[in-house]
Image: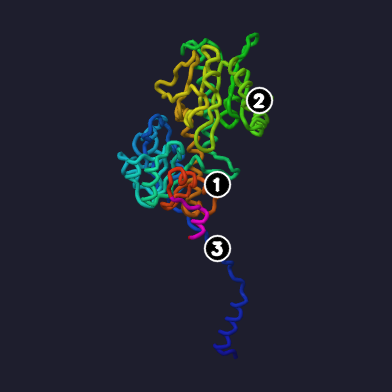
Amino acid sequence: MISSGDALKSLAREAALMPLEEMLEVGNKNKSLYIGIPRETEFQEHRVVLVPEAVSLLVNNGHRVLIESNAGKHANFSDRDYSEAGAEIAYSASQVYEADIILKIAPPSSKEIEMMKHKQTLFSALQLTVQPADTLRMLMEKKITAIAWDYVKDEEGIYPIIRSMGEIAGTTSILIAGELLSNINDGKGLMLGGVAGITPTEVVVIGAGTVGQFAARSAIALGASVKVFDNSVYRLRRLQRDLGTHIFTSVIQPKVLRKALMRADVAIGALRASYGRTPCVVTEEMVENMKDGSVIIDVSIDQGGCFETSRVTTHEKPTFKEYGVVHYCVPNIASRVSRTASYALSNIFAPLVLDIANRGGIDKLIRTDKGFRHGVYIYNGTLTSSYLGETFHLPYKDLDLLISAF
């Protein structure tokens, strides 16, 4: 007869031999984000950072979105569109700045920074040529983490928002040129393109980056004769490959460029400087020798312009004439088609915000994503951009060293 003690020992041995369930690591729970979208106050800024469909996506993933009333008005999105998507409507800017993450297009003004909280996260553009030192100091004092969306890179090392806005600006510049050549705008009465038996209009594109590529693509599609100039043979070769057709290309040699401009009906300035001012490659003399009624679209004007005769104009009064040549020098061409541009921005911002939540917060994304880290210029109040530090004589630290210290 088996004693109760022996029976318990036998059961214990059998239990020890039973297979156990595998213990798996439990992942971090997605972080719920509180996002604020203020109405843009900068002159001629008509875009909005998130469209209602993107807001709906974020809300359905458990995030809270607070948007200022009429923030999407100029892109033809109503407050009702956003409320139906699940956003909360704020009727004062100060209420929006109570959110943990602020998403906006233009850099914040001093007044907007005053409304911000300590330790907040800011996404906005970083306009290196006009960024005031005072606003940087104010952001640093409030221990803000500031990310420049125009300097964030994707997994292929490309600036996705800059490329997207460049595609829009390049295509739109050709559409604008077509309008300015027509009689309805007191132009020469030319159709931008080609018709059988008639010499096609000639388009000169200066710059073979994204803006230049899409300007050339649109002009070719309309039937125009296109010439592209750039100082990088690599970019010219890449443009030829991407367009899938052989067109006239040249490095920027003054004599060759002067001859091309003399025959051109349209000239597109599409150069972009990595830092500072765009190089001015078209002299006043070259413009003077262009045909009467020809059109210049200087897309580079937001960095100073690449035509010596260029000066900033507005959407309300976009053109002026110099030596009989029509100049269109409006910065931020993408705001002319604000709804399309808002969708393009939203397509990049919404997945980025979801990625922040999935990684467990902004700090973890900064640590793990090198491309995203490239856009950070202030981290917890410490300036991390060497260019801004040296330009404004402000102390700065290397971001990689900062994050490795914590």
The numbered mark at residue 249 is 2
Marks 3 and 2: which is nearer the front?
Answer: 2
Segment tinted magenta in the rendering: 395-405
Question: x%, y% of residue 358?
Answer: 50, 52
Question: x%, y% of residue 131?
Answer: 42, 39
Residue in the image at 46% along x and 43% along y:
391
Quickly name the residue at label 1.
371
Marks 1 and 2: which is nearer the front?
Answer: 2
- The secondary element bearing badge 3 is classed as loop
The numbered mark at residue 80 is none
Examine the structure image and report whether residue 397 is included in the region drawn in magenta: yes
Residue in the image at 45% along x and 25% along y:
330
Three-letter amino acid code at disc 1? Gly
254 vs 91, nearest the viewer:
254
Whichever of labels 1 and 3 marks the residue nearer the N terminus, that label is 3
Using the rendered image of the protein, determine whether residue 334 is visible from the camera's viewpoint: no
Tell me the distance, in whole angstroms, between the alpha carbons under discs 1 and 2. 32 Å
327 vs 3, nearest the viewer:
327
